[in-house]
Image (spheres, rainbow, N blue to C red):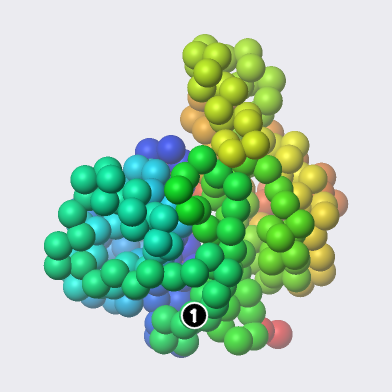
Amino acid sequence: MRFASLGSGSKGNCLVAEAAGSRVLIDCGLSPRETARRLGRLGLAPADIHAVLVTHEHDDHAGHAYAFAALHGVPVHLTHGTRRAQEAAGRSADGVALRVIEGREPFAVGAIRVEPFTVPHDAREPVQFVLGDGARRLGVLTDLGASTSHVEQTLSGCDALVLETNHDLELLWGGDYPKWLKERIAGPFGHLDNGCAERLLAALDRSRLQHVIAAHLSHQNNRAELARAALARALGCEEDWVGIATQEEGFGWRELKSN
Ligand SMILES: [Zn+2]
Ligand SMILES: [Zn+2]
């Protein structure tokens, strides 16, 4: 099993995972043309993708999911609430095969086992996903206001984690965002700051981790070195072992070895 990111952050998120010839995207917040271009960077084409899994309706995750899916004949998996919110946002599902999922019910896309899990975030019915191939599990968590015991149980024992480190609290509060926006971001349905991500990671069973990648960093309110340092503290590892998912580059293929 392997995975890569096409881009991560408030301007668009998209992650690709592959197991035994099956491939899924988690979210599609980049235009279809840009998604295709970045898939090409990873040696893939849109025709190689078997499903798009959407975490929630925010633009940076779902903004282009239907357009990509319609263009390439790929089904979209999403919760009932996300589907309704897409509708309310005026995104047409014409020509898109929609698969409505339950927030806690695993399903399969070819060889990939998908475990959705529910999260507190300011969207209609947001989920995040753990992807597995039967032997290895990749946990992806990009939009979370606060950790919960359900989140910690689900992510414990994963072989790889892509974890939100959205902001540094001091940079956020000292920055020039309006007060309401700062409160939204730092609130219980907003985004995870470096310190909360560190505590979340520290609370997990980390014994199997082969990769940890900090994701969804705010351009204004975070720095890669702060995010890295926070996750490295929880892991007790060198800071440069922790990967960073960037807005423009995402990150390249990471392999999950089955020893
Ligand atoms: Zn969001
Ligand atoms: Zn987001």
Name the residue carrying label 1: 107
- Residue 208 point in image, percent of width and height: 76, 72
- Residue 210 point in image, percent of width and height: 69, 68
Answer whether residue 199 is visible to the viewer in this image. yes
The residue depicted at 46 percent of the width and 57 percent of the height is 55
User: Could you tell me which secondary element the residue under label 1 belongs to?
Assistant: strand
Quadrant of res 138 = bottom right
Q: In which quarter of the image is the C terminus?
A: bottom right
Answer whether residue 229 is visible to the viewer in this image. no
Quadrant of res 90 = top left
The residue depicted at 45 percent of the width and 76 percent of the height is 18
- Residue 9 point in image, percent of width and height: 46, 41
The three-letter amino acid code for the residue at tag 1 is: Phe
Position of residue 173 in the picture relative to residue 73 (left or right) = right
- Residue 7 point in image, percent of width and height: 41, 49
Vertical relation: 99 (above or below) 225: below
